[in-house]
Image: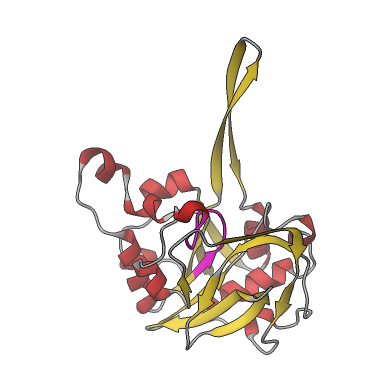
Amino acid sequence: MTKRILIAGESWTVHSIHQKGFDSFTTTEYAEGVRWLKAALEKGGWDVTFQPSHVAAREFPFTAEELAAYDVVLLSDIGANTLLLHPETFTKSKVLPNRLLSIRDYVANGGGLVMVGGYLTFQGIDAKAQYAGSPVEQALPVTIEKGDDRVEAPQGIEPVVADAAHPIVSGLEATWPILLGYNRIAAKPDAALVASVGDDPLIVAGTFGKGRSVAFASDCGPHWAPPPFVDWAGYDTLWTQLCDWAAGKA
């Protein structure tokens, strides 16, 4: 049976100014950070639909019924405003569904939700991701801080499995390659702490209504997840089992 996942986010555009004495010029570069995650899930039997942030702004499904075409919705490094402010709403004042409410209702109806950390998920850099207090937070197994929730660890910090019996980490070793940062989140009382990083949760799993949700507090690729992590032998297994669990297939 096909397992379908919608990944939204994991893209960015960098616009640089090069100043050389009197003269200057600009360059623009578009990049995506999804390739490690996408490859891992495809190896695990998942049919992956990827919407970069600029595509998700317009094409991310409007309703819980439309989202139900997917077993899991995964948000990674995409701020709440991208989903709230559809171009037709922002530029033409068109009334459209609130897609954060739709995500919450999708999970309540039996869908799977995964949020992956980064500068624009959970609360993010300068608190610009803006998921704290949102309907998406209601569906997640964690509470989100109101301010900038980043924990930067340039020295490297080692994840540790907290619940080796949980299906998400089945067969994986107790300690994993280092990470370089994460979003500080707190597990809700009825949620399961699966893995930790420093004194904080790394993976938290829980239920909401008929569905399941998972929070992964760090990144799925560089820079917070450097090459030792994305090249780790357990990387593919981790992400496949995590999404399998969120979909109720593990």
Q: Residue at x 36, y 71 (%)?
A: 104
- Relative image position of residue 68 (x, y in whole percent): 38, 69
| The N terminus - image quarter | bottom right
Q: Vertical placement of 176 versus 51: above or below?
A: below
| The C terminus - image quarter | bottom right
In depth, the one of 123 and 113 nearer the eye is 123
In depth, the one of 37 and 158 nearer the eye is 158
Q: Is residue 203 magenta?
A: no
Q: Vertical placement of 87 versus 153: above or below?
A: above
Corner quadrant of residue 166: bottom right
In depth, the one of 189 and 146 nearer the eye is 146
Q: For this view, does 196 lie left or right of residue 132?
A: right
- Relative image position of residue 28 (x, y in whole percent): 57, 29
Q: Main secondary structure of the magenta part?
A: loop
Q: For this view, does 133 lie left or right of residue 118?
A: left
Q: Residue at x 56, y 68 (%)?
A: 184
Q: Vertical placement of 241 versus 15: above or below?
A: below
Residue 20 appears in the picture as rendered: yes
Q: Is residue 123 magenta?
A: yes
Display coloring? secondary structure
Q: Vertical placement of 215 versus 165: above or below?
A: above
Residue segment shown in magenta: 114-124
Q: Residue at x 71, y 67 (%)?
A: 236
- Relative image position of residue 165 (x, y in whole percent): 68, 90
Q: For this view, does 32 lie left or right of residue 247?
A: right
Corner quadrant of residue 15: top right
Corner quadrant of residue 167: bottom right
Q: For this view, does 155 lie left or right of residue 195?
A: right
How many labels, in total? 0
